[in-house]
Each structure stands twice: as C-alpha cells, then as structure tokens.
Amino acid sequence: MIGESMYQELILEHYKHPQGRGLREPYDAEVHHVNPTCGDEITLRVRVGEAGKIEDVSYDGQGCSISQAAASVLHELTTGSTVRETLSVVDEFTRLMQGRGQVEPDEDVLGDAVAFAGVAKFPARVKCALLSWMAYKDAVVRSAAQ
Amino acid sequence: MTQTSFDVERIRKDFPVLSRELPGGRPLVYLDSGNSSQKPTQVIETMREHLALHYSNVGRAMHALGAESTEAYESARDKIAAFVGAPSRDEVVFTKNASEALNLVAYSFGNPANTDDRFRLGPGDEIVISEMEHHSNIVPWQLLAQRTGATLRWFGVTDEGRLDLSGLDDLVTERTKIISIAHQSNVLGTVNPVADVLARARQAGALVMLDASQSVPHHPVDVAALGVDFVAFTGHKMVGPSGIGVLWGRGELLEAMPPFLGGGEMIEAVWMDRSTYAPIPHKFEAGTPPIVEAIGLGAAVDYLSGVGMAAVEAHERELAAYGLDALRELPGLRLIGPDSLEMRGGTLAFTLDGIHPHDVGQILDDAFGVAVRVGHHCARPLHLRFGIPATTRASFYLYNTTGEIDALVRGLHHVQKVFA
C-alpha cells in the first residue's frame, strides 16, 4: 500500500475541511495558476499589512486532494507571518517537493507541511502540491511591485 | 461468463505482462487498453525474429535481406487490408499513428498543390467534427481552418453521451467539404451512427472520415461496408506496437490527393525543379517507414483474426455489461456515457462524488495494482461539455476478466473509504 503514505491523515483533513478557503477583500494582488497536465487551478489573493506582515491569503480553486490540501496548509502557515518568513517556508517546501523523496524535511520550518513529504516520491503529483505555493510566491512578488 | 469458444485464461497466457507482479507484490490489473494495449508473445516474437534475422531497408535494397524485409513489410499491408475489408491493398497507407493519418487527410484540403475539386477548401467552406472527439481529430481540423479560412463546425453530444443528430440537416450542408468523427468515443464508449451521418453527407456532397482508433481493435470493421471515404486507426491499441498507424482511403481519392510528406520512396522521378510521385500507397510513405512496427502490426492482426473479432467483441460486450452493473452499485458514481449496451463498447468513464480522478487513479494503482486512466483523456472539450475537469476511465480488452472488474470495484470502495 504505497499510496497510503501519500494520503496522510493531515492531508485528508485539510482536503475535507479546508482552512481559509474563499476569496476575500481587501487584497493587494490576485493570481490565477493552472496545472495544464491535470486541469487543477487556483485563484489566490494576498493582503500584505504593515511591516510586511501577511494579513490574509484567500483562495478558491478545484483539483485533487493534494492540490487543495496544499492550499489550505499554505493559508495556515503564511497568515500572520512576515513576507520574508513565508518565503523561506516556500523555499523549504519547494526543496522538499523537488527532492524525489531523498530530502529530509525541516519540520521546524515546515510545520504541517511535512505531511506532504510522501508526495515527493510521485513525480506526477509534485506539481499538484506546488500549485498553490507557486501561486502564492507569484502573488507576493506582484504585491511588492505595486 | 465467456463463450465456450473463447477462453480468456488461455488468451491471458499469450500476454507475458499480465502475469507479472508490481512492486510491493501487487498483481497487475490492466484496465487501460483504450490508452494502449498490451502485446502478445506472437507479436513480440515476430518483431524480435525480424530484427534478428531478416532486417534491412524496404523497397530499395537489392539483396536477399532487402527482399525478405520488403516481403514481410508488404505482406503486413496485405494482412491489414484483409483485416479491415479494404477493396485493395494499395488503399492501406502506413503512418506512424492515427494522428498522422488524420493530419495527412487534413493537409490534402486547401493545399495549393491540390488539383481536385473535392479537396479545394477556402472561406465559405465548412469542416464538421464533433464535441466527443479526441484532440487528434480536433486540432488538425482547427489548423486546417486557420490555414484556409474555412469554418469549423461540430456535432454536439447529448446528456446520455450520444452524438446529437437533431440538427444534422443544418449542420451538414452543401458548404460541408469533410466530416470527421470518431467511430467509437475513447471516453464515452459510444459507437456513432455512421450510416445516418454518411447518408446526409452524400446528399450534401461531403467526404466522410472516421477516427476508428477505438473501434478497429474491438469490433469486426469492414471499411467497404461502412461506405465512408477515409478511416484512421493505430497499431498500439490493437495488440500491435506503437509507431505504426494506418490510413485507409478510397483508392480513387488517395490518387487524387496531393502528397503529404516528401522524401525517399514516395517519388517516381526527381529533377532539380520538380518531381513526379509514386503510385499509392507509396506516394504517402516518404522515407524509411517503421518497418518492424508494420510487421508487428501484421502479426497483431493475425493474432486478432485467430481469436476472431466477433469473439473479441462478444467478450467485451459481456465485460461492459458486467462493468455497468457493478458500477451502478457504487454510491456517488456518475457514469459519463451511455448506460445501456446499445451501440457502445467496453469503455467506462465516470466520476465519484467529491473525489478527484487523480486521487482515484493513484489509490487504485498504489493499493491494488489497478491501472486505469484519469484526466481528460485527450478529449477536453467533451469534459467541458459535461462540466467536469476529468474522469476516471476503465477500458476493457480481450484479455480482461470479470474478476478484474471486481478488483476495480473493491478498489473504488476503498477509495471512497479513504475520502469518507
């Protein structure tokens, strides 16, 4: 049962009960990202407050459990942190996902996102996990440009 | 479940891959033949033997091996012509796949090198396809419309997954030059009513092409009896190798069409400023062809003929009946395609309420070794029509069993438990 290791309880929990889902106002930047191989898509907004603090990450989209749960975890990990802090989490998550299952995740940095470690062993699914995180990175860059 | 003359266990022994184990000790349950089929020993051995003992280029090598290779390659053409009831072997053109066969015909239209009125195409002319097509029977026609200024139109699909013929007379008119539709849908399993479309096409003076990639492997198909103008199919879905496909066309049309690819062996004589072309089928076979693949496809049709296509069709019909019944038992399952056996093949596409097909496919594979296809199956417009991004698709072939459908259903119950 190889697949079971990918579908961690925590991932299923986030899929069934997504945190922070739904698009909200106000926001500084909105992006729309698509995974053309499977049609997963996400619209994501960021609101950056004073001193570079992420006040809200709101999103809506459709796709597999991995892509949707990843967006929910992203919301939890980023909201309330500074842009700089969150970008280091994004980098660590990206490193884990692209590590083909060989990377030891830094749990202190990733928190709940370590549950996605099993996904890294399935190259076809890595893009699912990264969809919302890449959208977030894009949105943060755009908000800074404004 | 099976006919006495049809022994599925004996057939399974011909396919070495079906007895292998997947990592973790999982048995293989291969329900993805609509994507690509597995190969019997007879095909593998024929190809191996040709490579080992007879291989050389075809049609141009003046030595013993050249003669043996040419003989094997051309006799594969004879076998395929007989298999699909082609009135002449010269009407069978080898391509690399069905997509190339469709593109070949599309490039004949509106081509400045064309001299035949039936292939003249420009603004005001119309091309008709359908909403249930594979991308390979959509994109070549979109490109043709862009090149020539012709208009692309299409049949809709009913809620049940049938070709919507209600507007047939408005859709197919004297402006229509070519209609190209699937013989059997690669997602819905629907077998289309070719005769109805053809009758209207003849009234309107339009040519008709069938994408038979999903029908030739699964049913007895007789191109002459169908009465259409062109038929495309591919080797890898009919227990043959990849890299070889077939265009059948009425000889008189193939002769009238301009060449497609230019190169060696498609010519009669070449000067620096012009060329004359070889007779069909070689006019359309530029360059060294996929020799061993064509020979492998010849062995594949020998294999299928040995089993008997009527028996293959009957077996798959039983599997489709069993599969439809079994899937009905699953709560939250929505079948995308006809719910009855009438005019349908053994391809079952569906969604599960609240569970994305990629999750379904992943768990079926990882936990049970059940190989299905998930996604839009190269038929995105069809999925948009049904308002869904993707489906899970189980597709059956002559080597599948009702026990494998039971394994699929057990797997689907497990998937629903994981996401409950």
Image (cartoon, coloured by chain):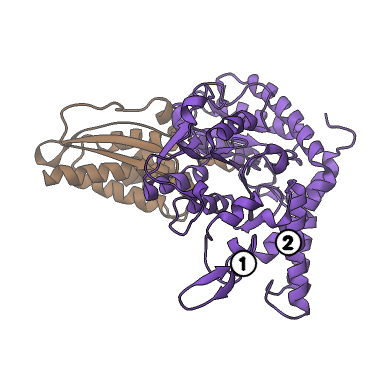
Chain colours: A brown, B purple
Left or right? Give the position of B155 relative to B396: left
In this rendering, the answer to whether B238 lies above or below B402 is below
Q: The residue tagged with tag 2: helix, strand or loop? A: helix
Q: In which quadrant will I find the C terminus of chain A?
A: top left
Q: Tell me the residue at 80%/50% (across/down).
A: B303
Q: How many marks?
A: 2
Residue A133 location in percent, x, y? 32, 43
In this rendering, the answer to whether B398 lies above or below B320 is below
Residue A27 location in percent, x, y? 17, 32
Left or right? Give the position of A26 relative to B299: left
* Residue named by callout 1: B278
Q: Tell me the residue at 51%/78% (across/down).
A: B271
Image mark 1: chain: B
Disc marking residue B295: 2
Tell which of A14 and B245 is nearer to you.
B245
In this rendering, the answer to whether A113 lies above or below B349 is below
Left or right? Give the position of A82 relative to B40: left
Left or right? Give the position of B157 relative to A90: right
The label nearer to you, 2 versus 1, is: 1
Are callouts 2 and 1 both on one chain? yes
Residue B411 in sight here = no
